[in-house]
Image (cartoon, grey):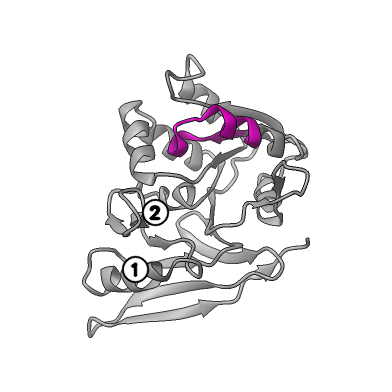
């Protein structure tokens, strides 16, 4: 009998992929680290692109990138209909689920329409590693800020809530991100949380923050907390740099 693995989430602020001059995307050290977290020699990896409407060209590029990893790769599409008769059973059979960036608002709405909210929680509780970038990082938290509604960021407070924190992504590449997260934590719109620069990921074990990891040459992670006086403190977390 196999021993259940501890629930883990790798929330990537940005930098899952490395551009290749020949065209295809290459998995970054962060994505290879997500595979390592499964503890499997050849894990079952399902990627989910609901946040970009399961666009065919995007999905094809993702397959090209993921097949560079030593993994058994599949893809769950929900547009125009689920690509598996039993989406729940397929997701629960995985070792790693990776969720792409895009619109976190649309992603959450479609997942809930298909009854997948409980499925992702069950997968996480059973030891399936959950990972994703941007929208695919925000979704596991209580909330954060997003450009799902347009270039001016807005706050969402209805994430899946597997992690009881707020989340900041693209923290050093979008000037709006830090100020809005600070305001939301200060006034109680969002709980305390964690943020990641481009090329940095937040690794949680259970519901506890475990460590930050980063692609070489990337920035930092941050812990954002509301003080008793209603102010906000931000503590820098130096990430562990992964091998290139």
Give the mark, 1 or 2, whose residue is nearer the N terminus.
2
- The percent coordinates of residue 134 (x first, y second) are 48, 53
Residue 175 versus residue 166 in the image, above or below: below
Q: Is residue 50 magenta?
A: yes
Question: How many numbered markers are drawn?
Answer: 2
Residue 181 - label: 1
**Which residue corresponds to mark 2?**
141
Q: In this view, does 162 lie to the left or right of 236?
A: left
Q: In this view, does 151 lie to the left or right of 213?
A: left
- Residues packed near mark 2 inside 10 Å, few (<14), some (14 to 19) or many (20 plus): many
Residue 55 versus residue 188 in the image, above or below: above
Q: Under tag 2, what secondary structure?
A: loop
What residue appears at the point 56 percent right and 48 percent down from the top-left corner? 6
- The percent coordinates of residue 53 (x first, y second) are 44, 32
Of marks 1 and 2, the one in the foreground: 1
Q: Does the magenta stretch include residue 235?
A: no
Q: Nearer the viewer, residue 82 or 85?
A: 82
| Direction bottom: furthest residue | 229
Q: What stretch is highlighted in magenta?
A: 46-62
């Amino acid at each position: 009998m196999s021993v259940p693995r501890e629930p883990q989430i790798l929330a990537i602020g940005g930098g899952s992929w490395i551009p290749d001059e020949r065209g295809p995307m290459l998995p970054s050290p962060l994505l290879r680290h997500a595979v390592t977290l499964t503890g499997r020699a050849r894990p079952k990896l399902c990627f989910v692109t609901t946040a970009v409407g399961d666009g065919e060209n995007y999905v094809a590029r993702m397959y090209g990138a993921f097949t560079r990893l030593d993994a058994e790769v599949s893809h769950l599409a929900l547009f125009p209909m689920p690509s598996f008769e039993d989406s729940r059973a397929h997701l629960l059979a995985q070792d790693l689920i990776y969720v792409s960036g895009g619109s976190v608002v649309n992603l959450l709405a479609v997942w809930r329409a298909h009854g997948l909210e409980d499925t992702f929680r069950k997968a996480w509780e059973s030891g399936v590693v959950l990972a994703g970038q941007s929208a695919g990082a925000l979704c596991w938290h209580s909330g954060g800020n997003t450009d799902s509604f347009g270039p001016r960021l807005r706050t969402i407070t209805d994430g899946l809530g597997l992690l009881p924190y707020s989340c900041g992504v693209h923290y050093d590449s979008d000037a709006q991100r830090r100020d809005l997260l600070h305001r939301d934590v200060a006034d109680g719109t969002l709980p305390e949380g964690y943020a990641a620069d481009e090329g940095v990921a937040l690794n949680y074990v259970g519901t506890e923050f475990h460590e930050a990891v980063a692609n070489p040459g990337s920035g930092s992670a941050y812990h954002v907390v509301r003080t008793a006086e209603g102010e906000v403190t931000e503590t820098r977390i130096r990430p562990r740099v992964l091998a290139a």
